[in-house]
Image (cartoon, grey):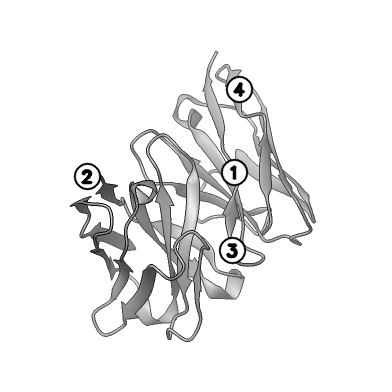
Amino acid sequence: EVQLVESGGGLVKPGGSLRLSCAASGFTFSSYSMNWVRQAPGKGLEWVSSISSGSTYIYYADSVKGRFTISRDNAKNSLYLQMNSLRVEDTALYYCARGIAAAGNYFDYWGQGALVTVSS
Amino acid sequence: DIQMTQSPSSLSASVGDRVTITCRASQGISDSLAWFQQKPGKAPKSLIYAAYRLQSGVPSKFSGSGSGTDFTLTISSLQPEDFATYYCQQYNSYPFTFGPGTKVDIK
Protein backbone atom coordinates (compact mmCIF):
# COMPACT_ATOMS: atom_id res chain seq x y z
CA GLU A 1 0.00 0.00 0.00
CA VAL A 2 1.37 3.38 -1.00
CA GLN A 3 1.85 5.62 2.04
CA LEU A 4 3.12 9.19 2.23
CA VAL A 5 3.51 10.72 5.67
CA GLU A 6 4.45 14.37 6.08
CA SER A 7 6.10 15.77 9.20
CA GLY A 8 7.92 18.86 10.38
CA GLY A 9 5.11 21.37 10.31
CA GLY A 10 4.55 23.89 13.06
CA LEU A 11 4.33 27.52 14.09
CA VAL A 12 7.12 29.82 12.94
CA LYS A 13 7.61 33.58 12.93
CA PRO A 14 7.83 35.55 9.70
CA GLY A 15 11.34 35.34 8.34
CA GLY A 16 11.91 31.99 10.01
CA SER A 17 12.69 28.57 8.56
CA LEU A 18 11.15 25.14 8.65
CA ARG A 19 11.95 21.81 7.01
CA LEU A 20 9.18 19.46 5.98
CA SER A 21 9.74 15.77 5.42
CA CYS A 22 7.67 13.19 3.58
CA ALA A 23 8.32 9.53 4.38
CA ALA A 24 7.33 7.19 1.58
CA SER A 25 6.57 3.48 1.75
CA GLY A 26 4.83 0.79 -0.24
CA PHE A 27 6.53 1.56 -3.55
CA THR A 28 9.95 1.97 -5.14
CA PHE A 29 10.54 5.57 -4.15
CA SER A 30 13.53 6.08 -6.42
CA SER A 31 11.42 5.37 -9.52
CA TYR A 32 8.95 8.22 -9.04
CA SER A 33 8.97 11.97 -9.26
CA MET A 34 7.71 13.72 -6.13
CA ASN A 35 5.87 16.94 -5.51
CA TRP A 36 4.73 19.43 -2.90
CA VAL A 37 1.30 21.05 -3.08
CA ARG A 38 -0.12 23.44 -0.50
CA GLN A 39 -3.54 24.62 0.55
CA ALA A 40 -4.06 27.79 2.54
CA PRO A 41 -6.90 27.64 5.10
CA GLY A 42 -10.24 27.64 3.29
CA LYS A 43 -8.57 28.04 -0.11
CA GLY A 44 -7.78 25.93 -3.15
CA LEU A 45 -4.77 23.86 -4.11
CA GLU A 46 -1.47 25.45 -5.16
CA TRP A 47 1.42 23.52 -6.68
CA VAL A 48 4.70 24.38 -4.93
CA SER A 49 7.55 22.27 -6.29
CA SER A 50 8.49 19.09 -8.15
CA ILE A 51 11.60 16.92 -8.27
CA SER A 52 12.39 14.12 -10.69
CA SER A 53 13.27 10.62 -9.55
CA GLY A 54 17.01 11.21 -9.69
CA SER A 55 16.86 14.88 -8.63
CA THR A 56 17.98 15.98 -12.10
CA TYR A 57 14.97 18.15 -12.75
CA ILE A 58 13.58 20.55 -10.15
CA TYR A 59 10.82 23.11 -10.53
CA TYR A 60 9.33 25.76 -8.26
CA ALA A 61 6.33 28.03 -8.22
CA ASP A 62 7.33 31.68 -8.57
CA SER A 63 5.79 32.35 -5.16
CA VAL A 64 8.46 30.23 -3.44
CA LYS A 65 11.41 30.39 -5.83
CA GLY A 66 14.59 31.47 -4.05
CA ARG A 67 13.12 30.74 -0.62
CA PHE A 68 12.17 27.04 -0.75
CA THR A 69 14.37 24.09 -1.69
CA ILE A 70 13.06 20.66 -2.60
CA SER A 71 15.30 17.62 -2.20
CA ARG A 72 15.06 13.88 -1.78
CA ASP A 73 17.07 11.01 -0.35
CA ASN A 74 16.27 7.86 -2.29
CA ALA A 75 18.23 5.73 0.18
CA LYS A 76 15.92 6.92 2.95
CA ASN A 77 12.73 6.96 0.86
CA SER A 78 12.24 10.55 1.88
CA LEU A 79 11.27 13.87 0.30
CA TYR A 80 12.06 17.24 1.86
CA LEU A 81 11.07 20.86 1.57
CA GLN A 82 13.38 23.40 3.17
CA MET A 83 11.44 26.61 3.66
CA ASN A 84 13.35 29.81 4.43
CA SER A 85 12.31 33.45 4.73
CA LEU A 86 8.79 32.34 5.53
CA ARG A 87 5.94 34.78 5.05
CA VAL A 88 2.47 34.94 6.54
CA GLU A 89 1.09 33.97 3.14
CA ASP A 90 3.01 30.68 3.29
CA THR A 91 0.60 29.50 5.99
CA ALA A 92 -0.97 26.35 4.59
CA LEU A 93 -1.35 22.62 4.78
CA TYR A 94 1.53 21.16 2.76
CA TYR A 95 0.93 17.88 0.95
CA CYS A 96 3.48 15.65 -0.67
CA ALA A 97 2.27 13.78 -3.73
CA ARG A 98 3.73 11.02 -5.85
CA GLY A 99 4.13 11.76 -9.53
CA ILE A 100 3.93 9.43 -12.49
CA ALA A 101 6.64 10.78 -14.75
CA ALA A 102 5.67 8.51 -17.63
CA ALA A 103 2.26 10.16 -17.57
CA GLY A 104 3.61 13.70 -17.43
CA ASN A 105 4.05 13.83 -13.64
CA TYR A 106 0.43 13.26 -12.82
CA PHE A 107 -0.16 13.10 -9.03
CA ASP A 108 -1.64 9.73 -8.12
CA TYR A 109 -1.17 9.48 -4.34
CA TRP A 110 -1.16 12.20 -1.70
CA GLY A 111 -0.14 12.33 1.94
CA GLN A 112 -2.36 13.72 4.69
CA GLY A 113 -0.46 16.98 4.94
CA ALA A 114 1.66 18.97 7.39
CA LEU A 115 0.37 22.27 8.72
CA VAL A 116 2.69 25.27 8.55
CA THR A 117 1.59 28.41 10.35
CA VAL A 118 3.59 31.60 9.90
CA SER A 119 2.61 34.20 12.45
CA SER A 120 4.19 36.65 14.82
CA ASP B 1 1.39 30.47 -16.86
CA ILE B 2 -1.67 28.44 -17.82
CA GLN B 3 -4.81 29.59 -16.02
CA MET B 4 -7.47 27.04 -15.16
CA THR B 5 -11.11 27.96 -14.66
CA GLN B 6 -13.99 25.79 -13.49
CA SER B 7 -17.73 26.13 -13.72
CA PRO B 8 -19.84 26.20 -11.80
CA SER B 9 -18.04 27.24 -8.62
CA SER B 10 -20.66 25.37 -6.65
CA LEU B 11 -23.76 23.32 -7.29
CA SER B 12 -26.51 21.68 -5.33
CA ALA B 13 -27.69 18.28 -6.45
CA SER B 14 -29.74 15.34 -5.26
CA VAL B 15 -28.74 11.74 -4.80
CA GLY B 16 -29.06 10.02 -8.16
CA ASP B 17 -28.51 13.16 -10.21
CA ARG B 18 -26.10 13.29 -13.11
CA VAL B 19 -23.57 16.05 -12.49
CA THR B 20 -21.19 17.70 -14.95
CA ILE B 21 -18.34 20.04 -14.06
CA THR B 22 -16.45 22.00 -16.69
CA CYS B 23 -12.78 22.97 -16.66
CA ARG B 24 -11.14 25.31 -19.15
CA ALA B 25 -7.45 25.99 -19.74
CA SER B 26 -6.20 29.38 -20.95
CA GLN B 27 -4.17 27.63 -23.63
CA GLY B 28 -4.02 24.16 -25.11
CA ILE B 29 -2.80 21.42 -22.78
CA SER B 30 -3.44 18.39 -24.99
CA ASP B 31 -4.87 15.76 -22.60
CA SER B 32 -2.64 16.60 -19.61
CA LEU B 33 -5.57 17.16 -17.30
CA ALA B 34 -6.34 15.55 -13.96
CA TRP B 35 -9.36 15.66 -11.65
CA PHE B 36 -9.21 15.39 -7.87
CA GLN B 37 -11.88 15.01 -5.20
CA GLN B 38 -11.41 16.56 -1.78
CA LYS B 39 -13.65 16.07 1.23
CA PRO B 40 -13.50 18.40 4.26
CA GLY B 41 -10.42 17.76 6.39
CA LYS B 42 -9.06 15.19 3.97
CA ALA B 43 -6.28 15.08 1.40
CA PRO B 44 -7.18 15.30 -2.28
CA LYS B 45 -7.87 12.00 -3.97
CA SER B 46 -6.99 11.32 -7.58
CA LEU B 47 -9.95 10.46 -9.81
CA ILE B 48 -8.93 10.90 -13.43
CA TYR B 49 -5.74 11.58 -15.35
CA ALA B 50 -4.95 12.12 -19.02
CA ALA B 51 -8.37 13.78 -19.28
CA TYR B 52 -10.34 10.52 -19.28
CA ARG B 53 -8.30 7.71 -17.70
CA LEU B 54 -9.70 6.47 -14.41
CA GLN B 55 -7.28 6.18 -11.51
CA SER B 56 -7.11 2.63 -10.21
CA GLY B 57 -9.91 1.89 -7.76
CA VAL B 58 -12.11 4.82 -8.79
CA PRO B 59 -15.67 3.77 -9.60
CA SER B 60 -16.86 3.98 -13.18
CA LYS B 61 -19.60 6.47 -12.29
CA PHE B 62 -16.83 9.05 -12.72
CA SER B 63 -15.84 9.91 -16.27
CA GLY B 64 -13.79 12.59 -17.94
CA SER B 65 -13.61 13.97 -21.42
CA GLY B 66 -12.05 16.73 -23.44
CA SER B 67 -8.81 17.75 -25.02
CA GLY B 68 -7.00 20.98 -25.77
CA THR B 69 -8.68 23.64 -23.65
CA ASP B 70 -12.10 22.31 -22.65
CA PHE B 71 -12.71 19.41 -20.29
CA THR B 72 -15.55 17.90 -18.31
CA LEU B 73 -15.94 15.67 -15.29
CA THR B 74 -19.21 13.76 -15.08
CA ILE B 75 -20.64 11.84 -12.16
CA SER B 76 -23.32 9.60 -13.61
CA SER B 77 -25.40 9.05 -10.47
CA LEU B 78 -24.50 11.14 -7.46
CA GLN B 79 -24.20 9.24 -4.19
CA PRO B 80 -23.86 10.61 -0.63
CA GLU B 81 -20.12 9.91 -0.60
CA ASP B 82 -19.63 12.09 -3.71
CA PHE B 83 -20.47 15.34 -1.99
CA ALA B 84 -17.11 17.09 -2.01
CA THR B 85 -15.03 19.72 -3.80
CA TYR B 86 -13.61 18.81 -7.18
CA TYR B 87 -10.46 20.33 -8.68
CA CYS B 88 -9.00 20.11 -12.15
CA GLN B 89 -5.26 20.46 -12.71
CA GLN B 90 -3.08 20.85 -15.78
CA TYR B 91 0.27 19.07 -15.82
CA ASN B 92 1.18 19.90 -19.40
CA SER B 93 3.78 22.46 -18.41
CA TYR B 94 5.30 24.03 -15.32
CA PRO B 95 4.11 25.76 -13.28
CA PHE B 96 1.37 23.20 -12.79
CA THR B 97 -1.93 24.93 -12.03
CA PHE B 98 -5.21 23.96 -10.43
CA GLY B 99 -8.69 25.20 -11.06
CA PRO B 100 -10.41 27.04 -8.21
CA GLY B 101 -12.62 24.08 -7.39
CA THR B 102 -16.29 23.16 -7.66
CA LYS B 103 -18.14 22.41 -4.46
CA VAL B 104 -20.90 19.82 -4.83
CA ASP B 105 -23.37 19.78 -1.98
CA ILE B 106 -26.73 18.29 -1.16
CA LYS B 107 -29.88 19.95 -2.46
Q: In this view of the protein, which residue sits in the foreground, B42 or A59?
A: A59
Packing grade of label 2 (10 A; few <14, some 14-19, many >=20) is: few
Q: Which residue is mark 3?
A: B95
B76 w.r.t. A26: above or below: above
Identity of the amino acid at label 1?
Answer: Ser
How far separated are the C-alphas under marks 4 and 1?
21 Å
Q: Nearer the viewer, mark 3 or mark 1?
A: 3
How far separated are the C-alphas under marks 1 and 2?
48 Å
Q: Nearer the viewer, mark 4 or mark 1?
A: 4
- Could one spot residue B57 in this view of the protein? no
Q: Are marks 2 and 3 in contact (CB under 8 Å)?
A: no
Q: Which residue is mark 1?
A: B60
Which callout, 3 or 1, points at the residue further toward the start of the chain? 1
**Quadrant position of residue B13:** top right
Q: Nearer the viewer, mark 2 or mark 3?
A: 2
Q: In percent of the image, x 44 and y 81: which residue is there?
A: A53
Q: Which residue is mark 2?
A: A120
Q: In this view of the protein, which residue sits in the foreground, B66 or A56?
A: A56
Q: Residue A51 placed where, x, y %?
A: 45, 75
* SS for callout 3: loop
Q: Are marks 4 and 3 in contact (CB under 8 Å)?
A: no
Chain letter of disc 1 in the image = B
Q: Residue A43 placed where, x, y %?
A: 46, 38
B55 w.r.t. B100: above or below: below
Q: In percent of the image, x 59 and y 63: which residue is there?
A: B95
